[in-house]
Image (spheres, grey):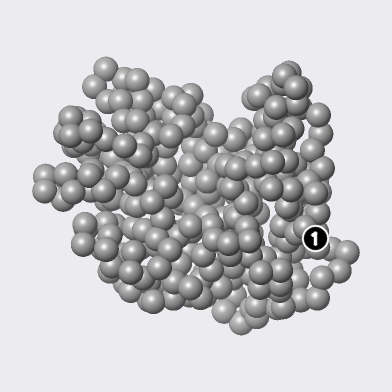
Amino acid sequence: MKIFQGFRDNEELDALLEAGADEFYTSITETPDIDLRNHYPSEYGLTSTKELREALDILHSNGSALFIAVNDTFYTDVDVLQAHEQILRLREYGVDGIITPSLALLLELQEGAYDGEVCLSTMQPVFNVETYRFFKQFGLSRVVFPEQVGAHEVQEILEDDAMQTEAFFLLSHDCVNIEPYCLFHHQEHKYLTVPPNDDYEHCRTMPEVDTILDTPDGLGKRMVEEGYVSFDRYHINDNANLYDFHRAGLDYLKMGNRPFMLDHKLLVLDIARSLLDMLDDPALTRTDFLERSSVLVRDALARRNIHSIPRMCTWYLKQRNV
């Protein structure tokens, strides 16, 4: 299983490569010849073709690949044609692939001359095999599973070698208004094979959110508390799903923390790399992995005085002074 890492700017790349990221994605906007819309502000990606060339030089010289997010959800006919032209330009620069949720853009690319990889965006995830079969006809390279799906639910897709697959490393998800184990998917002990004890945080505990600086009327505090629907998660559930996906043949573990600061990315990447290295042992049982991985995650977060995902989001908001 490879790690698919998002990044903000080229200054992050050397450290992320050294920490074990395998392939990379970002966005590029506001250049004279390329302005591919995505759902993040421009400061979370590249803003010049000079930066794009530098990123490609760094990554290709290290045997890695670069994907560009084209993640807007709505395109007019004119938008699609313009995006297609710019994506062909990205390919001329040497970009390995794009990430998009747009059916209109997929149709346009299928009929055109684009020969790079195309990954389905997390804004258009695959929940089941019927969705997979629909998108398979567009020549995609990779599909992505949503946070609410477990490995056992998409086993048939994972067994199909025609397309690569990816899923989030849930500890690294950057969206404060998504609770990956919501009631849509999460049954209280769905993945629990080790009895809970003091080592595991209970998933129904209210998140403890510190006062966030420079926010009117506690806006940032409410973003975290309300965005997470007042639930914290068992780290054990995330690790169990990771074990299942790894054993089922998932190709990529996506680190969805592109806007976060570098030290946060490195913290989560170090945890993910350690867990994947642990999973390389074919004799490792699920129960043993849950016991060892829970201790690893807990200790890694405790060293940073972080004890839950909401606290990580709070910390992130503080860095931005949101």
The residue identified by callout 1 is: 202
Dividing the picture into quarters, in which one does residue 186 lie? bottom right
Dot 1 amino acid type = His
Left or right: residue 232 compared with residue 106: right
In the rendered view, tell whether residue 211 sits above or below residue 255: above
Q: Residue at x 21, y 57 (%)?
A: 138
Give percent across and percent down for residue 111.
11, 48
Res. 198 visible in picture: yes
Q: Residue at x 45, y 67 (%)?
A: 250
Q: Residue at x 82, y 70 (%)?
A: 196
Please tell me how crowded label 1 is: few (under 14), some (14-19), or many (20+) other residues with Cα within 10 Å.
some
Give percent across and percent down for residue 321.
68, 22
Give percent across and percent down for residue 59.
39, 41
**The C terminus sits in image quarter:** top right
Give percent across and percent down for residue 288.
71, 76
Q: Residue at x 30, y 25 (%)?
A: 35
